Image (spheres, coloured by chain):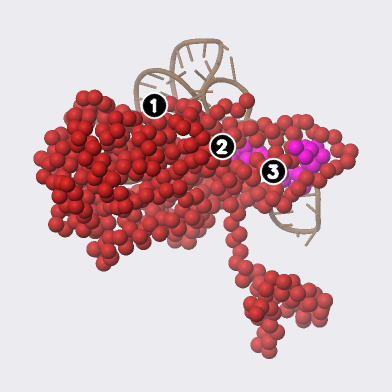
Amino acid sequence: MIPKLRLFNSLTKQKEEFVPINPPYVGMYVCGPTVYNDVHLGNVRTFISFDIIYRYLLHLGYKVRYVRNITDVGHLTGDTDDGEDKIGKRAKLMNLEPMEVVQKYTNGFHQVMDIFNALPPSIEPTATGHILEQIEMIKTIIDHGYAYESKGSVYFDIGKFNEKYQYGKLSGRVVDDLMANTRELDGQDEKRNPLDFAIWKNASSEHIMRWNSPWGIGFPGWHLECSVMSTKYLGESFDIHGGGMDLKFPHHECEIAQSVGASGKEPVKYWLHTNMLTVNGQKMSKSLGNSFLPSELITGTHELLDRPYSPMTVRFFMLQSHYASTLDFSNEALSAANKGYKKLMNGLKLIKEMSFVPEEGVAQNQQAVDQINGLADNCYRAMNDDFNTALTIGHLFNLLKKINSLQTGGLKYGEIGQEGFDKLKSTYLSFVEEILGLKEELIVEPKNLIGILLTLYKEAKEAKNYDKVDEIRSLLKNEGITLKDMKQGIDWAYEE
RNA sequence: GGUCGAGUGGCCGAGUGGCUAGGCAGAGCUCUGCAAAAGCUCCUACAGCGGUUCGAAUCCGCUCUCGACCUCCA
């Protein structure tokens, strides 16, 4: 008996059985990137974590609508209200339209997701594409009495909200404590309470990204888009909301407040938070200057790297830890992951080519069959326990031993029988490829392989081994490659 | 300062009361034209101190160390 899927709900701080609101449909919303510059590996980790969750839910047969937004409204660069926003600033710097900046980094983000083999979400809405809906939600929140206008901006009224609801319950904050700890910030005089946050912000003259609204020209608050787009595509209450730990407060807290303020309903059943990727024990972040870009990793050009690492190596490395644990990024750990990943891939290559061979006179080895079945169950058990990919991989390595033993003859096909073999093959394939999203990376360049064949061709020719010469020529011709014996030497061309 | 989390063998990293996690590195063996791969075996740890318990890495308390959030951040 394999226990059902359970996941750690940040809201209740407990592992709970996963029961969708409206099975077999599952709504999942994940906070996507702000596209004002390149995503780094810390960002990638979160998206890979949710990719696994998405893939596993699909594998279990759920009809998942996975919504991941693109934040393309520029939000303020710091805690001072100087009117400058990240995308606008970048646009000025690069002499581009803000939407060019947005497009550039959105494209880059998609490329990165692709090389790490993350499935695209079902819907990828943008904040700028939902300005009208955001204005509508602001109106509703104002109507409900949880927001007020002040000097062309609209603020969420935490004091009012907290009379009926509990602001801070997700991140464990207490409003009174927060009040005692607030700092002096610009623009606070517009607010009734320092904790109040902007859901619409009046645009200063230098602010490029701006829209008309009932409160004047401005732009929506950062937290609002997620409430709006999750509601639009998943409903007022949906199953899973995910994001990095660092978004828990204030972003997700504000999201809850806005959604509750608008609909009166609890928006999210299960909150999932991924932990940080660290470097030497410290959170990877741009401001600390310790972040790695995917491109620096693949080319090995980052100063902290002593060699390049492939995207799948990194994906595997990340899956060897649990999504809710911090993971430290280092050369040693990556090198170890690289070898482990290749070992797993060699198994994948083998099992794909293997098929059951009936053997006469070989007795079934019940222990081996039980081991295979047990390991297959363990893979599900591990994934069902809050998506424990690290443990799943451990079980896969044990299954791999069976595959290798079959290959070398240490274990006979007859011993495990057709059923045992099928179980081994289907489990390994579906967990490695479909669920963990790991794929083989053929690292050789086809042109280099052709070069090797040309060398053999040349040697055969020099040895006057014309049968071999003809064979090589004919084999290459089958692949659409013509050999050219010229005075200057041997070369090849695409067959015309 | 407030809130929360973490400290596991040479390294990474699972594990929440008793049962071999796993990977990498290291040692030995088998196989082998060479080389590799693979298989088998070994190395069996839980920050410190106390407590609960028949039994604790796992629960409780204290101490030390580290980190995250409290401001944009995956």
Residue A12 circle label: 1
**N-term-proximal mark, 3 vs 1:** 1
Answer whether labels 2 and 3 touch (C-beta < 8 Å). no
Answer whether labels 2 and 1 touch (C-beta < 8 Å). no
Disc 1 secondary structure class: loop
According to the image, label 3 marks what residue?
A425
Disc 2 secondary structure class: loop
- Residues tagged by mark 3 and mark 1 found on one chain of the structure: yes
Disc 3 secondary structure class: helix
Measured Cα–Cα span from mark 2 to mark 1: 24 Å
Picture coordinates of residue A123 (x, y %)?
Answer: 42, 48
Locate the N terminus of chain A by quadrant: top right
Q: Nearer the viewer, mark 2 or mark 3?
A: 2
The answer to whether B54 is drawn above or below residue B8 in the figure is above
Residue range highlighted in magenta: A393-419
- The residue type indicated by label 2 comes to Leu
According to the image, label 2 marks what residue?
A60
Measured Cα–Cα span from mark 3 to mark 1: 39 Å
Residue at x 19% of width, y 32% of height? A145
Residue at x 11% of width, y 45% of height? A151
Give the letter of the chain under mark 2: A
* Total marks in image: 3
- Does the segment drawn in magenta span residue A332? no
Give the letter of the chain under mark 1: A
Residue A202 circle label: none
Q: Residues within 10 Å of mark 2 (few under 14, many from 20)?
A: few
Measured Cα–Cα span from mark 2 to mark 3: 18 Å
Q: Nearer the viewer, mark 2 or mark 1?
A: 2
- The residue type indicated by label 1 comes to Thr
Chain in red in the render: A
Q: Which secondary structure dominates the residues rendered in magenta?
A: helix
Picture coordinates of residue A208 (x, y %)?
Answer: 21, 58
